[in-house]
Amino acid sequence: IILLTARDSDESKLQGLEYGADDYIVKPFSASNLEVRVKNLFERQKKWQQAYQRSLIQAEHEPAESLPEGTASLAPPDRHFMEELTALVQSEMANGDLSIETIASRMNTGRTFFFKKVKSLTGLSPVEFIRTLRIRHAASLMEEGELTMAQISFKVGFADPRYFSKIFKLIMGVTATEYRDSHFRNGPQP
């Protein structure tokens, strides 16, 4: 959100930015200035999405319920949205039938708005985002070493352990077994 306004006071600028505006431009303004600021906002968002995706996958030592570190730089409404979404997915982790429509409804949004919001904040579709959270949680369960692969796949909402393995490798870059084995010095656990 870019505010284009005639209000030039520091108080107005501060208020606009506190409400979540990305930029505040006072009239009169030049079109080239606006274009550069829009371009910079898009570039910053793209970099943030990439950093968010990396931190989401690499956050193996953080609790799976927490948001990645870069989330603190989000505007308060976006941060609240992501916290609420993450908490909702965590509470329904074992529910393999959890649908995007159900999540959007529980988030009090329409499906289209929900899709666009998640995509703009994370760079991932809602399905990709949910899968990533599930795989991240599965990785933390593997590190605990108390469950079998099949138990873990069911616990994170995958009914088919082979499909779980395929998605795990796609997201983490290694197979689930390789990941588990790399976290145990004395060899693999049951």
Image (cartoon, grey):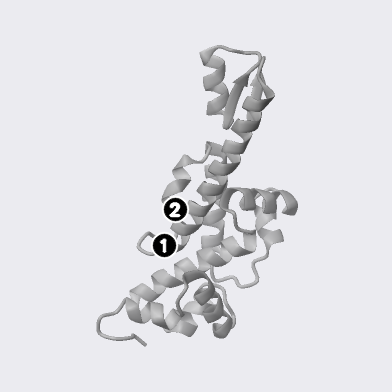
Disc 1 marks which residue?
58
Instruction: Tell me the amino acid under the disc marked 1.
Output: Gln
Whole-angstrom CA distance, mark 1 to mark 2, is 9 Å
Q: Which mark is residue 117?
A: none
Give yes or no for contact between labels 1 and 2 (Cβ–Cβ under 8 Å): no
Above or below, 175 against 15 in this view is below
Which residue is most to the front?
32
Q: Nearer the viewer, residue 19 or 56?
A: 56
Element type where label 2 sits in the image? loop
Labels 1 and 2: the sequence-earlier one: 1
Q: Position of residue 38 (x, y in %)?
A: 63, 34
Which is nearer the eye, 123 or 165? 123
Residue at x 61%, y 73% (from the top left corner) = 96
**Percent position (x, y) of residue 49?**
54, 51
190 relative position to 20: left or right? left
Q: How many marks?
A: 2
| 154 lies left or right of 32 | left
Residue drawn at the location 51% of the way across and 78% of the way down: 153
Q: Would you call the spot at circle 1 few (<14 residues within 10 Å), some (14-19), or many (20 or more)?
A: few
Q: Residue 32's image quarter? A: top right
Question: Which residue in the protein does label 2 denote?
Answer: 68
Instruction: Identify the image quadrant of residue 180.
Output: bottom left
Q: Measured along the vertical axis of the image, is residue 43 above or below residue 88?
A: above
Q: Amino acid at mark 2?
A: Pro
Quarter holding the N terminus is: top right
Q: Residue at (55%, 75%) from the top-left corner?
A: 167
Q: Is residue 81 left or right of residue 102?
A: left
Front-most of 189 and 93? 189
Q: From where the camera sits, is residue 47 visible?
A: yes
Relative to residue 136, is residue 27 drawn left or right? right
Q: SS at mark 1?
A: helix
Which of the pair 55/134 is nearer the observer? Answer: 55
